[in-house]
Image (spheres, rainbow, N blue to C red):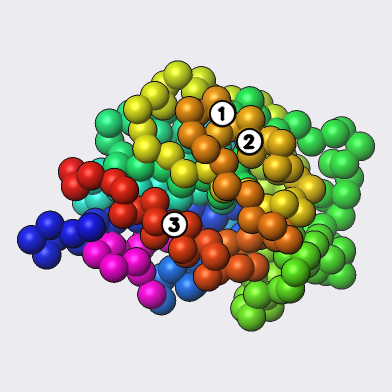
Amino acid sequence: MSDGGVTRTLVALHGNFASSRWWVDLLAAPPAGWRVFAPDLPGFAGTPHPGPVSIGAYADWVQDWLRAQGVTRPVLLGHSLGGAVALEVAARGPQALSGLVLAASAPLTGLVTPQEHYPVLELLRTTPALLEASLGALFPSGRPANFADLLTDGANMAATHYSGNARALADWQVDAARLAGLPTLVLGGELDALITPDLVRAQAAALGSAATVLPGRGHGFPQEDPAAFRALLEGFLTTLPTP
């Protein structure tokens, strides 16, 4: 995967109620020939959030961050809300990427949260036990070893984001035709109640890709089963031509 010692770049984008610490396994042991970056998006884990809460604004920030890091032609990996951000960046210029990995990503048509659920989202700000139960439910086969860290970062999300991110996902969509020709890996979890296997398969079909659904895993499958996730990711990376 590397040519003449040149290391390629994978940029991992976390989801809602999350941070870069969701990618500790990838950061600690990057795939051979690759370096891994995992930025904390605006309003997460202490990153300032000066602008609107929107997928477009997050994509603006990611593009600025990539330029500041001098990263060109990366593979973008996005989980959940981070998948929507990765899709938005990709749709703006698929030729600027080498590939796209969508892990339980928000659907191409956006994700609508029922209005009656918004009070519960706000309760998560002030009810630690509810937040712990909500995050714990993402890992039905077992919580990852660093769950306490993930819970801490989830609780430190900007106050604007609890309802704001749900509204941002409802207001966003992307045209699959704008991603034509971009190598894409689409993954999901069999027990994911948020991004269900049917949604994962529909997303893959729209992108002209195959869907892989991990049996017995939930929304947080990259952290719930890091070995299986890594095998799928590394298999995909090996198929990408050298830029």
C-alpha gap between disc 1 and disc 3: 19 Å
In percent of width and height, residue 48 lies at: 50, 54
Name the residue carrying label 3.
233
* Label of residue 241 in the image: none
Give the quarter of the figure containing the N terminus.
Answer: bottom left
Give the quarter of the figure containing the C terminus.
Answer: top left
Instruction: Name the amino acid, label 3.
Output: Leu
What residue do we see at 61% from left, 68% from top?
225
In this view, the residue farthest toward the right is 116
Instruction: Name the amino acid, label 1.
Output: Ala
- Magenta region: 29-42
C-alpha gap between disc 3 and disc 2: 18 Å
In percent of width and height, residue 19 lies at: 56, 62
Name the residue carrying label 2.
201
* Label of residue 205 in the image: 1
Near mark 1 (Cα within 10 A), the count class, few <14, some 14-19 or many ≥20, is: some
